Amino acid sequence: MPCEISMRCRALSPSATLAVDAKAKAMRAEGIDVIGFAAGEPDFDTPVVVRNAFKDALDRGQTRYTPVAGTLELRTAIASRMLNDHGLRYDMDEIIVCNGAKHALYNVFQAILNPGDEVIVDKPCWVSYPEMVRMAEGRPVFLNCPESQGFLPKMDDLVKCISPRTKAFVLNTPSNPNGCVWTREQLQALADLAVEHDFYIIADEIYEKLVYDGVQHYSIASFSPAVKNRTILINGVSKAYAMTGLRIGYACGPKEVIGAMVKYQSHATSSANSAAQHAAAVALTMDQTPVEEMRQAFEQRRNKLVELVNAIPGLSCRTPHGAFYIMMNIHGIQGKSIKGKTIDGSLSFAELLLEHAHVAVVPGVAFMAEGYCRLSYATSMENIIEGLRRIADFVKELK
C-alpha cells in the first residue's frame, strides 16, 4: 500500500509539553481562566535593544538568504561570547547557526549517527532527545537518575551504559525538566570517560545563564583540548534573552562535525532567519544586565514555587539550582480520586487538574519520570501564588 505514513514517523511520540500548552490555550480561547505551568519559554519581553535590532535589520533589507552556517556577524558574536564566558576559542568553520537550539540538536544527531549507534541519555530527560536519536536511526540508552540522587547520575551507573556502540552522551545542565546542575567533579568524570571510550559529548547548554544560589555552570568543552575535540556545544538565544519565537540556536564543535551539519542543513532548511540573526548578534554583544535581571526574578519565583508546593500534603519537590522548572513529586496522592476519576499516574493527574482546577502542568511520563509533573516558573509571581492555591484546593478535594 503506497499511500501510508512512514514507520519512522508512526513510531514517534508527539511533544507532550506542546500538547498541554495547546490544550490550555484552547481553553483560554473559550474564556476559561487557565493558569499555565507548562510552557518552556520566558514570559519576559524581549529586550528593547534586541527588538530594535530586529526592526533595523528589516529596514536595512536584511531579508535575504545568508550563508548556510550563519552570518559572519553572528558567528563572530558567538565566538566572542564563548571566549568571554568560557575561555573557549572557536573558528568560523567550527560554528553553525540553526533554526533554534532544537534544530541544532537535530542536525547533530543526523551528522554523527549511523544506524544502531547508541546515545546515552540520562533520565528524567527532555522529551525530544530520545525521539531525535531515533529519527537519526540511533538507539537511546537511558541512565536512571532518581530523585534520591538529586536527579544526578552516579558515574558507576554511567559506565555500565557504555558499550562498543556508544557514539555520544547527551549532557543537559542545567536540566530540563528537573533544573539539576552537574558539579565540576561529575563533569570531569564524564569528560574522562569520553576520552577513554572515544565518544562525543553533546552538551545542551541552553539554560546556562539561569543558575541560582551562587551555583556555577561549567562548560565541559573548556576542561581540556581532548574533551573539546569530542564536544558539540548547543546553545541559543531563546531562554536567556526571551527570544523563543525568533528561532536562533547554534552549535560549536569540531569542524568535521560542524561541516557535516552545514551540508545537512543546506538541503533541509538553508539558513536561519536573516533579520533574527542580526538581533541575536546584538543580544550576545549587548550589556547583559537584562539577562541578570531576568535570572534574579526567576530565582525569586523558584523560591516561592518550591515553598508552596512543599506546603501541600501529598506533594513535594526538590529545590532546583538552574533552568526554570521543578519536578513535583505526586506519589503521595496517587490512587486518590475526584468525582469518580482516579489519579493513577502523572497523565491522569495533569488531565484532572486541568479539568477541575484549570491549571496546566506537564505529566512526568513525558520525561520518563512517572510519578512526577513538571511545573515551569516562567510565569508571573501572581500566577504562581494563584496556581498553587488552586492545586492545594484540588488536592483537598481528593478522596
Image: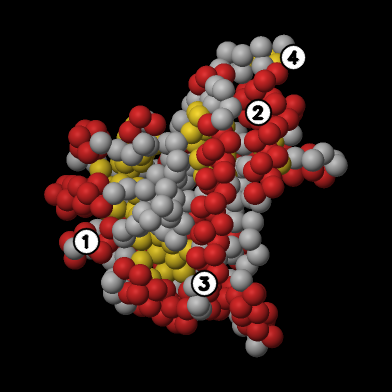
Please report contact status of discs 4 and 3: CB closer than 8 Å, yes or no.
no
Foreground mark, 4 or 3?
3
Q: Residues within 10 Å of mark 3 (few under 14, many from 20)?
A: few
Residue 353 is situated, as x and y percent measured from the top left of the image, at: 68, 28
Distance of label 3 from label 2 (alpha carbons): 36 Å
Q: Is residue 78 above or below residue 373?
A: below
Which of disc 1 and disc 4 is earlier in sequence? 1
291 with respect to 121 (left or right)? right
The residue closer to the viewer here, 102 or 370, is: 370
Residue 66 or 317: which is nearer the viewer? 317
Residues at badges 3 and 2 in contact (C-beta under 8 Å)?
A: no
What percent of the width, then of the height, locates residue 243?
A: 59, 64
Toward the right, the furthest residue is 31
Q: Earlier in the sequence, mark 2 or mark 4?
A: 4
Residue underneath mark 2: 392
Residue assigned mark 3:
289
Q: Amino acid at mark 2?
A: Ala
Between marks 4 and 3, how big is the CA–CA gap? Answer: 49 Å
Residue drawn where x is 51% and y is 78% of the image: 286
Residue carrying label 4: 339
- The quadrant in which the C terminus is found is top right
Where 260 sits versus 113, above or below? below
Left or right relative to 348: residue 133: left
Q: Quadrant of residue 27?
A: top right
Of the image marks 1 and 2, the number of the one nearer the N terminus: 1
Residue 4 visible (yes or no):
no
Q: Residues within 10 Å of mark 1 (few under 14, many from 20)?
A: some
User: Quick one: label 3 or label 2, which is nearer the N terminus?
Assistant: 3
Tag 4's secondary structure?
Answer: loop
Q: Amino acid at mark 3?
A: Thr
Using the image, tell me which numbered label, if any, was put on residue 223. 1
